[in-house]
Amino acid sequence: SSRFADVAQAPPDPILGVSEAFRASTSPNKLNLGVGAYRDEDLKPVVLSVVKKAETKIVGRAENKEYLPIEGLDAFRKATVDLLLGAGHPAIQEGRVAVVQSLSGTGSLRVGSAFIARFMKGATVYLSNPTWGNHRNIFGDENVEWKYYRYFDADTVGLDFKGMMEDLTAAPAGSVVLLHGCAHNPTGVDPTAEQWGAIADLCKERNLLPFFDVAYQGFATGDLDKDAFAPRLFVERGLEIVVAQSYSKNLGLYGERVGALVMVLNDKEAATRCLSQLKRLARALYSNPPTWGAKIAAEVVNDKELFDEWKGEMRGMAGRIERVRGELKTALDAKYPDKDWSFITRQIGMFSFTGLTPAQASGGRRVDNMTNKHAVYMTRDGRISLAGLNSAKVDYLANAIVDSVR
Ligand code: PMP
């Protein structure tokens, strides 16, 4: 018998477990709306044309496979901050941005979490309720205490702005607030520009540290600058911010693990010291980040022609999602006119929060019906990824939803 005989079975991941179940299904109608990964109209994964072009260029240079510095590839670090703040931003010129390339959004969040554990001892991280399920693991595994702030209002299928502000007002000074930069996951509900301003002011007043999770820049509106509105606004108002960036979705580099942890601070010396500590943390976690994806991202962002082409491809992806959103709403309106389905086209980004589990009491029963009866694979919180839907499947999905809601 093993010395590890007492190790309990871990539960399947609530999101990636859905893909496992989907692969195991033999239903001819099966539809994977679980994981947030972009698919084309044939529901096939996509490698962006700019990525292929960048890869060809990189291969042509026949570079070596040496380690990157702990903080990552310089050309990528420049590119990622340019993308976040806009090239030529004063914070960049003044050298008050600390940036480490890390293992996509998740790894960058984890480095941030480790930084909080080490240098903000006792601070609580406030997460939106609901949020991307992995946030709890990322902070919990570093023994950083986390709590929820109210975010989603099931009655209006919109933002509970009042509840959010009340909870953040009550948070102890020095707490961390995790904010989704745009296209909130799982709800697809973002604050308005005015509300962002009020949140920034509150963070300043209450001395809260905003920690932005930017996993969908370019995917909310199809426009990189518009989608960076919130973090840029906070910096403009003089707040120090921490940001975890991911290139999984906007460049489709999921498996390459490309991202960065960025700290925009008020003075250069603090940025230099924080960078040294981020490197110290990264050294023990994974030593240095992988090269390939960072080279691709740097090539695309730093080359004017590729950059412009990328913007077009991003608009294409965001546009396809918006189109199937509209088609789904139209189909549901036709099949079940007594219910207000307008939330589907109000929500933005990759996901729709269908409200299929409006109350805990339903115990995921409606989602079970979607999956067990209709082979529609989705997370138990009622989230569907519209990136996995095409026009041909809209009618099928709408029937499944109507059958499950009733
Ligand atoms: N944050 C949010 C809100 C996400 O939705 C995701 C991807 N599902 C991530 C972070 C991280 O993804 P990755 O590690 O692939 O960048």
Image (cartoon, helix red, strand yellow):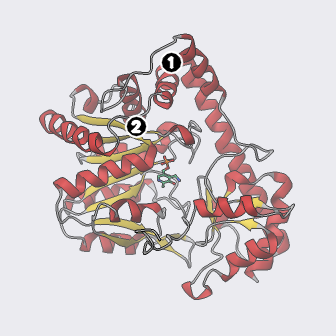
Res 361 quadrant in image:
bottom right
Question: Which residue is at the front of the view, 313 or 74?
Answer: 74
Q: Residue at x 46, y 29 (%)?
A: 294
**Up-down relation of residue 312 to residue 172 (above or below):** above
Residue at 23% over, 60% down: 208
Image spot of residue 313 (x, y percent): 65, 33
Disc 1 under 8 Å from ligand 1? The reply is no
Q: Is residue 307 left or right of residue 137?
A: right
- Marking on residue 156: none
Residue 244 image offset from top left, x and y in percent: 38, 46
Q: Relative to 151, is 236 on the left or the right?
A: left
Q: Secondary structure at mark 2?
A: helix
Task: Name the residue rendered at 51%, 37% in the picture.
Answer: 224
Q: Which residue is mark 1?
A: 303
Give the camera-side residue of 211 and 161.
211
Amino acid on which the number 2 mark rests in the picture: Leu
- Residue matched to label 2: 84
Residue 272 percent across, percent down from the top left: 17, 34
Task: Look at the numbered disc 2 and say if its residue's Cβ is closer than 8 Å to ligand 1.
Answer: no
Label 1 crowding class (10 Å Cα cut-off): few <14, some 14-19, many 20+?
few
Earlier residue among tags 1 and 2: 2
Residue type of the residue flagged with mark 1: Asp
Density class for disc 2 (Cα within 10 Å; few <14, some 14-19, many ≥20) is: many
The vertical placement of 358 against 302, above or below, is: below
Task: Note whether residue 338 is visible.
Answer: no
Q: Tag 1, which secondary structure?
A: loop
Hey, which residue is sitting farthest top in the picture?
61
Q: Between marks 1 and 2, how big is the CA–CA gap?
A: 16 Å
